[in-house]
């Protein structure tokens, strides 16, 4: 009897699927059958979101990230084209398969981010300067109002926050061993003149700040 009941259920579902369609993708069955709806605007929104993970456009350049299937390493190709059509940079990069995306782009560089386990994330910076090699940093935080500056940690030494200036490749090490936060608890970094303000949430969930003078690397 249980097999007969199963066959009846299958026949009912098939009958519902054969009913007349209403609108674009909405299928009408009886009142007890759930309605399946897929609006065309939802499909476009989902596609736009997915595209945004692998493409980025700024004033002068368009960057595109393409996965190379069935590879354990060197799994992506990044291509940066000038909008004027007179310059192109295309190369294979070693980022994590099925876990990488473009997180930022500018006239200076394109950033490809990927997870590296737990709260860890790593970022590869591909520069629009022809002969400048890629640079990779872990636990990266970009200064909101100055993208030429980032903070990061090296070799998981979380008591030293490194402030890096891409324009001159100078770097400042800041002792944060007395601060009550982990790298992934930093909310943001902002800059005013030669002072960077670090905004973070403390262990007791209070919003706190720390100021860092970076005059030495400007």
Image (cartoon, rainbow, N blue to C red):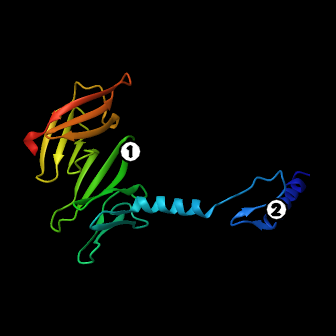
Q: Seen in the image, is 45 located left or right of residue 113?
A: right
Q: Which mark is residue 117?
A: 1
Q: CA distance from mark 1 to mark 2?
A: 45 Å
Q: Quadrant of residue 131?
A: bottom left
Q: Which mark is residue 177?
A: none
Q: Residue furthest bottom?
A: 86
**Closer to the camera in the image, 124 or 106:** 106
How crowded is the residue under tag 1: few (<14 C-alpha within 10 Å), some, or many (20+)? few
How crowded is the residue under tag 2: few (<14 C-alpha within 10 Å), some, or many (20+)? some
- Disc 2 marks which residue? 16
Q: Quadrant of residue 156?
A: top left
Q: Residue furthest left?
A: 216
**Closer to the camera in the image, 22 or 116:** 22
- Helix, strand or loop under label 1: strand
**Closer to the camera in the image, 45 or 173:** 45
In the picture shown, does residue 42 fall above or below 145? below
Residue 182 locus on image (x, y percent): 31, 32
Q: Seen in the image, is 106 located left or right of residue 35?
A: left
Question: What is the number of callouts on the image?
Answer: 2
């Amino acid at each position: 009897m249980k097999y007969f009941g199963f066959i009846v259920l299958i026949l009912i579902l098939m009958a519902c699927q054969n009913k007349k369609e209403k609108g674009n993708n909405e299928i009408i069955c009886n009142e007890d059958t759930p309605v399946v709806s897929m609006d065309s605007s939802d499909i476009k929104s989902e596609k736009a979101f997915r595209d945004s993970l692998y493409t980025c456009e700024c004033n002068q350049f368009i960057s595109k990230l393409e996965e190379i299937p069935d590879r354990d390493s060197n799994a992506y190709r990044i291509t940066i084209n000038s909008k004027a059509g007179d310059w192109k940079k295309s190369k294979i990069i070693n980022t994590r398969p099925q876990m990488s995306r473009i997180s930022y782009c500018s006239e200076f560089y394109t950033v490809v981010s990927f997870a590296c386990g737990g709260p860890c994330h790593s970022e590869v910076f591909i520069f629009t300067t022809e002969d400048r090699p890629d640079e990779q940093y872990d636990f990266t935080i970009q200064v909101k109002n100055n993208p030429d500056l980032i903070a990061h940690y090296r070799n998981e030494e979380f008591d030293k926050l490194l402030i890096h200036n891409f324009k001159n490749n100078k770097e400042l090490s800041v002792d944060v061993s007395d601060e009550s936060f982990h790298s992934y608890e930093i909310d943001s970094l902002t800059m005013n003149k030669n002072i960077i303000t670090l905004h973070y949430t403390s262990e007791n969930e209070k919003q706190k700040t720390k100021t860092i003078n970076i005059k030495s690397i400007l």
